[in-house]
Amino acid sequence: MAGLELLSDQGYRIDGRRAGELRKIQARMGVFAQADGSAYIEQGNTKALAVVYGPHEIRGSRSRALPDRALVNCQYSSATFSTGERKRRPHGDRKSCEMGLQLRQTFEAAILTQLHPRSQIDIYVQVLQADGGTYAACVNAATLAVMDAGIPMRDFVCACSAGFVDGTALADLSHVEEAAGGPQLALALLPASGQIALLEMDSRLHEDHLEQVLEAAAQAARDVHTLLDRVVRQHVQEATVLLGD
Amino acid sequence: MKETPLSNCERRFLLRAIEEKKRLDGRQTYDYRNIRISFGTDYGCCIVELGKTRVLGQVSCELVSPKLNRATEGILFFNLELSQMAAPAFEPGRQSDLLVKLNRLLERCLRNSKCIDTESLCVVAGEKVWQIRVDLHLLNHDGNIIDAASIAAIVALCHFRRPDVSVQGEEVTLYTPEERDPVPLSIHHMPICISFAFFQQGTYLLVDPNEREERVMDGLLVIAMNKHREICTIQSSGGIMLLKDQVLRCSKIAGVKVAEITELIQKALENDQKVRKEGGKFGFAESIANQRITAFKMEKASVDTSNIEEKAEEIIAEAEPPPEVVSKPVLWTPGTAQIGDGIENSWGGLEDSEKEEEEGGIDEAVILDDTKMDTGGVSDTGNQGAPIVLSDSEEEEMIILEPDKTPKKIRAQTTSAKEKAPSRSQVKRRRKKRTAN
């Protein structure tokens, strides 16, 4: 795709957004009835579904039980129809394993696992349509699902991706911008304290620009937090109205 | 084999030492261990030693048809294997989490950063491209696998030479190494991973953790950079919470370290190039140190035995008479055994007649003895119940004269083989009558 202008002279990206602008986010909680917690999120065209079961007894080998904490088990799967070309293996390949490990690392840091020793919390994430920023969408969906399940967490975990083109940092990359080969950063943040739960970067970026990109990603994550917070409050309000209180 | 857990006192010791800015091997906080790079006889083969962590890298190439959506680019394939010789905890099928993490990190570091020019690997667009395969094997695990592996990968790629190819119209000629010198790969830059280990919720930081430090760390941050200070990959793992300025500080440290390591790599490559040109010896055999003691064998010193008898008599005459030593054989009653040096077995105090059985006796009870001593010396406690008496032979007792040496069960099974038995030192201890044979 030679000559594709990721950032025009007036500062507009391919889809008409500004450099620091996020895509439209729509989220719903409590999508499934039988799961303990579930959530669905749409970030632009990226659609992700997260389901949480737990805390429950450890399935399988009891020896994996941790005596003072809960075990967090994450599985990532992307549907075969999620990308432009049909994927052959929805799960079990290296990328999905890595994604599962990263999600686990993110949520083990955020969930208050000390409150549920010797138990297991399962988080399953499914990507229905991948248009860039899949890790971020998975984390955001999983946060909402964990909240829906009522599992105590330190704070929201909000994630966003960021890139760097022509001296400007872009927030929330779409698939076209990711495929162009520039540097991409994925960041998962706990907004209240500003602590970074996961940081991942690909492709070459000069050290001097690192701060700028980190800041753009952090700001985008904080914007995501505002939106997710609103979604949670609205859901709780609807639930209390239905309960008739 | 499951990994032996780290004891609490060792963990506390390591953490306290880190709090006082001390490392067990005497390094400073930001110091790397010694890096040694050695090359094999073929191009593209190298071993990198980071302290005691050892990684072998090998590059190979093959002509294949390209991927459909990338018809003009060559294919790169990376594979890191954790060999079972690296650590007892590495078993096939048991290391998947660590393996996935390391492989993905290496792939992202080397492939996504475009350190190799894949367009130059194209021979005929859409039909034939070079597939470069980098295989890394971890030979010894002493911490910080990812750094050693990334250095090994990039050194092997820089060292590798692929066969020369020429295209004339429709004809493609592949030259063997004898016809034309092989051609090096075109490498834009050398990304090197630097690992930072965090302790005590991010308060303390160490560069290049060794195996013990890795066990007690909270989390790891890996930054891959090249010498132009371009960051190729960042990966945080292990569940630590980082702050933005911590990340920026680490990237500055990484810049310094990468410059040093890149210089080292360049020097090693130049040295190897020089040695090959001058016709000197090269290869792994040359780079293994000769002065290391791997097996110890003393040469037999010759002793002058000409007047040994006189000397011996002199010594004996001068020496004091030896004290009276009466051997006290420890008798076991049938069906009991004793392990260790506790108090004496008092079960057999009623049966004194067994003392005579040391003398005389027939050797026909070989089979009997086998069943009695069918387990090793220490596991005799299994025989606690009724003793197995097959015949009324007087040799029912197993009299252990030296209880600290466990008798082994290597006995000749038949009586005809008892001529061989006296030559075994263990049997002498068990049967006094046998040594008379």
Image: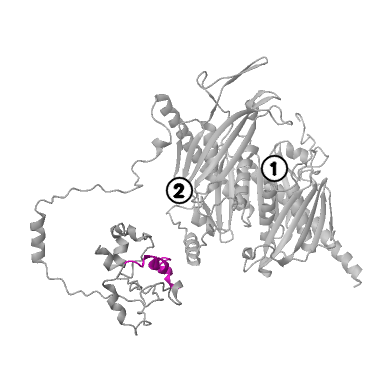
Disc 1: CA contacts within 10 A as few (<14), some (14-19) or many (>=20): many
Disc 2: CA contacts within 10 A as few (<14), some (14-19) or many (>=20): some
Q: B200 and B282: which one is in front?
A: B282
Where disc 1 sits, the SS reads strand
Quadrant in the picture for the N terminus of chain A: top right
Q: B350 and B319: which one is in front?
A: B350
Quadrant in the picture for the C terminus of chain A: bottom right
- Whether the residues at callouts 2 and 1 have beta carbons within 8 Å, the answer is no
Q: Label 1: which residue?
A: A184
Same chain for the residues at labels 2 and 1, yes or no?
no
- Residue A121: image x %, image y %? 71, 63
- Residue A152: image x %, image y %? 73, 66
Identify the mark at residue B52; answer none if there is no mark: 2
Q: Chain of mark 1?
A: A
Q: Residue at x 56, y 56 (%)?
A: B198
Residue type beneath disc 2: Lys
Where disc 2 sits, the SS reads loop
Q: Residue at x 28, y 60 (%)?
A: B422
Q: Residue at x 31, y 57 (%)?
A: B420
Residue A20 visible, this angle? yes
Whether residue B337 appears in magenta in the rendering, the answer is: no
Apparent side of residue B427 relative to residue B188 in the rendered image (left or right): left
- Stretch of the chain drawn in magenta: B363-381
Residue type beneath disc 1: Gln
- Residue B164: image x %, image y %? 57, 22
Whether residue B377 appears in magenta in the rendering, the answer is: yes
Apparent side of residue B128 relative to residue A149 in the rendered image (left or right): left
Apparent side of residue A237 relative to residue A170 in the rendered image (left or right): right
